[in-house]
Image (cartoon, rainbow, N blue to C red):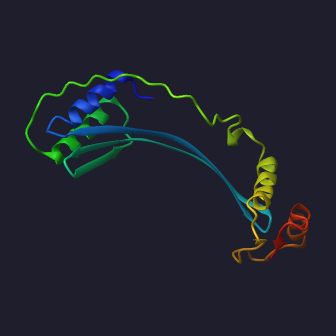
Amino acid sequence: MLNKHICSEILAVAMSTGADFAEIYQELTRNNSIHLIDGKIDSVGDSVLSGVGIRAFLGTRTVYATTTDISREGLLRCAAGVADAIGQSKKAVSIHLTERIFPNAHPVRRLPGDVAVKERTDILKEACIAAKADFVKTSTGFSKCGATMESVTTMLKAAGDQIKVK
């Protein structure tokens, strides 16, 4: 996470050409995915998305820039690009940040990457029922052999009489 000092520097640079307001958005997201075809796991993916967005406002104008270079120099270069795009007159800006900590209303108890693939697969199948889907499609047509009897049987067992299986 960005510390308070670097955030103050970034905001001061972003607002240095007359912006009324500036904000920073930092993202660090881990994505896990499982793709099923015919009730069988086709692929499992894991990726990380990391970067920072800086937005400045001047009246009704908005400028937004992003960077994956989260070094101090990279962040200040991105903020300078935002300031240049706003491009009014140079002015000194003093930023004073006050930290506010909000409670985590939705804590993550288990990271998806820490859950076994079979358990994640079972959860995905149960989610179809919980979502009150009318149908679960066992084959997308992209597989060479279509739905197998095993995948249809698995889905029928999981669905019971609550959901139809195509």
Say whether residue 160 is left or right of residue 112.
right
Q: Position of residue 109 (x, y in %)?
A: 70, 34
Query: Which residue does the image show at 25% across and 25% down from the upper left?
Result: 95
Say whether residue 47 is left or right of residue 85.
right
Say whether residue 132 is left or right of residue 73.
right
Based on the displayed image, in which of its 4 quarters is residue 11 positioned? top left
Say whether residue 81 is left or right of residue 122.
left
**Foreground: 164 or 36?**
164
Based on the displayed image, in which of its 4 quarters is residue 151 positioned? bottom right
Q: Residue furthest left?
A: 89
Query: Which residue does the image show at 32% across and 21% down from the upper left?
Result: 5
User: For the N terminus, which image quadrant?
Assistant: top left
Count of numbered labels shown in the rendering = 0
Q: Position of residue 60 (x, y in %)?
A: 21, 52
Q: Position of residue 131 (x, y in %)?
A: 73, 60
User: For the C terminus, which image quadrant?
Assistant: bottom right
In the rendered image of this protein, does residue 53 appear above or below residue 41?
Answer: above
In the rendered image of this protein, does residue 152 appear above or below residue 15?
Answer: below
Based on the displayed image, in which of its 4 quarters is residue 128 positioned? bottom right
**Foreground: 101 or 128?**
101
